[in-house]
């Protein structure tokens, strides 16, 4: 019976280790997703700033309806 008990404990340790690795992988994926969202937000802000600069330039030269 000791061998069965030792085997069951070993199996549970393997399951816990696998779950820890799955959680770590999920954490890495979440971090990568957060970085992607931050990059998209920065790109959006840069695009808006670029548009504002072009509109200001066009208004300065009276080239647009803005």
Image: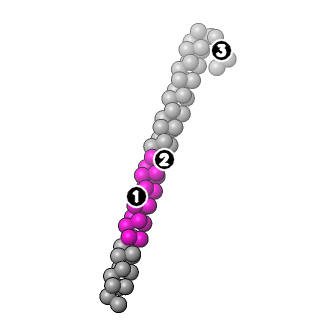
Distance from Cα at disc 1 to Cα at disc 3:
53 Å
Look at mark 1 in the image and give the residue it sits on.
24
When the figure is inspected, residue 51 is found, relative to residue 58, above or below; the finding is below
Q: Residue furthest right?
A: 65
The quadrant in which residue 48 appears is top right
Nearest to the eye among marks 3 and 2: give it: 2
Span highlighted in magenta in the image: 14-34
- Residue 56 lies left or right of residue 7; in this view the side is right
Nearest to the eye among marks 1 and 3: give it: 1
User: Is disc 1 placed on a helix, strand or loop?
Assistant: helix
Asked whether the residues under the numbered discs 3 and 2 touch, taking CB atoms below 8 Å apart as contact, a structural biologist would say: no
Residue 33 at x, y = what percent? 48, 47
When the figure is inspected, residue 66 is found, relative to residue 4, above or below; the finding is above
> Which circle's residue, 1 or 3, is located before the other in the chain?
1
Q: How many marks?
A: 3
When the figure is inspected, residue 53 is found, relative to residue 7, above or below; the finding is above
Q: Nearer the viewer, residue 52 or 43?
A: 43
Q: Quadrant of the C terminus?
A: top right
User: Is disc 2 placed on a helix, strand or loop?
Assistant: helix
Task: Give the crowd class for mark 1: few <14, some 14-19, many >=20 residues within 10 Å.
Answer: few
Picture residue at 52% right of the left edge, 26% below the top:
49
Task: Give the crowd class for mark 3: few <14, some 14-19, many >=20 residues within 10 Å.
Answer: few
Badge number at residue 33: 2
Distance from Cα at disc 2 to Cα at disc 1:
14 Å
Badge number at residue 13: none
Distance from Cα at disc 3 to Cα at disc 2:
39 Å
Task: Give the crowd class for mark 2: few <14, some 14-19, many >=20 residues within 10 Å.
Answer: few
Q: Quadrant of the N terminus?
A: bottom left
Look at mark 3 in the image and give the residue it sits on.
64
Report if residue 58 lies within the magenta region.
no
């Amino acid at each position: 019976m000791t061998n069965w008990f030792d085997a069951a404990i070993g199996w549970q340790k393997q399951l816990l280790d696998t779950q820890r690795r799955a959680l770590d992988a999920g954490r890495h994926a979440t971090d990568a997703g957060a970085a992607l969202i931050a990059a998209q937000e920065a790109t959006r802000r840069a695009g808006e700033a670029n548009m504002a600069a072009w509109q200001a330039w066009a208004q300065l030269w009276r080239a647009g309806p803005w």
